[in-house]
Image (cartoon, rainbow, N blue to C red):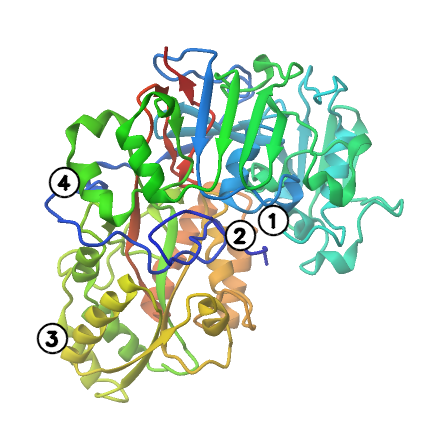
Amino acid sequence: MPSVRTVIAVLAAGALALTGACAPANQGAPPQGTSPQATPSAAASYSPPKISVGTAEDSRGPAIAPDGVVKGGTVTMIDRDDFSHLDPAQIYVNTEANFALLLHRGLTGYKRVAKGEYKLVGDLATDAGTASDGGRTWTFTLKDGVKWQDGTPITSADVKWTIERMFAPFITQGPTYIQQWLTQEDHRAAYEGPYGGKELDAIETPDDKTVVFRFKAPHADANYAFAMAGYNIVPKAKDTKEQYDKQPVSSGPYIIKSHVVDKSYQLERNPQWDAATDPIRGAYPDVWKLEFGQEALQITDRLVADAVADQQAFTFYALTPPERLQQVLSDQSLAPRRMISPSPYGNYYYFNLDRVKDIKIRQAVNHAWPGRQIQQIMGGPQAAALPTTILNENTTIGYESYDLFGKAAKPDGDIEKAKQLLAESSDPTPTIVYAYNQTPVQERVTVAIKNALEKAGITVVTKPMDRKTYYDSIGLVDNAFDLYWGGWGADWASGSTVLPVIFGPVADGAPNYSHLNDPALKAEMKKIAEMPDFDEQNAAWMRLDRKIQETITPLVVAENRIATMLHGSKVGGAEIDPQQWIVSPNTIFVKP
């Protein structure tokens, strides 16, 4: 299965790292203490992004400019943490993937067509790829004029080398989809990388512009996988192995001028980058400055004040903290500088199926769930939405809603229905051991859960867990808990990077926290993943989403965070990327 990716988002003090695409998500960090009546629900006016596959014409540059765009100037990005990795093969964190847009390019990527509308297009490739042999073979052709920062052309040999080096032992992070599809699930046992002189026969380069991937099984969504930052291209001639992580070669619009670890970056234009070849990156500022070491509260206060030096500043991921959320949402003078977007990550309360074996008990918990009370604790509708499906509507193409447990009609829970189910169960007065991440917010959420379930007749034994070792504790297969929080996010807009992961292998540390181990389900997921038609595949994932909840009920779908962030008054084009839940650099510009 794919490696774990964490999304490092600065949230409330004491939070776990918020995880993202194909990774566990954050628990215990939502805003609190704000009035739900301060502003209308952000979710009410939000529409999920539209994502489609573009044509060769869509894949031409330059990028579509945002309204009022101005070229030139210096923009400043302020956040808490420096980036651990710059080598594309080591990137699986959304902050690093976002920064990589300034330096690296891949075969495919997402073109912003309009606000909330994106097309998967060719980045270095002339289009989004051509599938054949029922989706087992994918062919890409490189564009003319794409170059490295030293002026040498980017070739198909570089693309082949990029994927081959991802099998090397020193690559310990990053995605593993393509590697597994080319070889086997334990891809490192199949191939050790190119440094010993051995090539991977499943990747062919018939000429300098063409690269062909031959997978073991059909993968209709391979062009989406190639859009991940982890598959950005590395030059074969300039690969320095482990050292490449600190001194990468740019194919993107900027090069690193200076870097003071944990303090700052300065980026300047890459003269070899040609906007005519790039449909994705606007690259409007001349200079990028990045400052690190600021906490979310400091960043928010600086952006609220909008002093001269910070008018050209913004943040990639510093969410407005609890103590400032009401102010930021209610101050209409800040409205032009607010950015609001629901999280694309799925959040769940998993049942340990080894211990909670009766489906009627699991269904009773779902019906008794105090969704609206938890939402209020988190700051109301403007801070959290209440989804009803396993797959997230914000990152699933072909999404279809369902509400199996009537949570929209009864967001406070249906205690009578829960009691009825318990009466029909093997244990009408069960005991649930609930483990939770011990943060101030989760303490309050735990009280709400305990009170609601006990009204239905369920005894709840609470087990506070150390936030530093929370995932280690719930990740043990032989744990002593019945219910616990966890999260996951899609690597692209499909259920193929969610359901087969959270219901995948049962092992210590694996993200199948419910320990769901059903051979029929695994066979069905494999069948869906190998469907040659992407739209049919996504429709099948949605049907399976509902089927899993109807026939197994391995989890409770939890609340969905809503991000609120600010930018300076002279920053234009600032938008939260709805798939990455981070402010994209592609449309940023500096106003005069």
> Does dot 4 land on a helix, a strand or a loop?
loop
Circles 1 and 4, Cβ within 8 Å, touching? The answer is no
- Contact between labelled residues 2 and 1, with CB atoms less than 8 Å apart: yes
Decide if residue 322 is on the left or right side of residue 518: left
Helix, strand or loop at label 1? It is: loop
CA distance for labels 4 and 3? 31 Å
N-term mark: 1 or 2? 2
Q: Mark 4 points at which residue?
A: 40
Marks 1 and 2 sit apart, C-alpha to C-alpha, by 8 Å
Relative height, residue 314 to residue 458 (above, below): above
Sequence order check, earlier mark of 4 and 3: 4
Q: Which amino acid does label 1 sit on?
A: Pro
**Residue position marked by numbered label 3 in the rendering:** 416
Give the SS element for disc 2. loop
Q: Mark 1 points at which residue?
A: 175
Q: Does residue 150 appear anywhere in the picture?
A: yes
Specify few, some or many for label 4: CA neighbours under 10 Å numbering under 14, 14-19, or 20 or more: some
Disc 2 marks which residue?
5
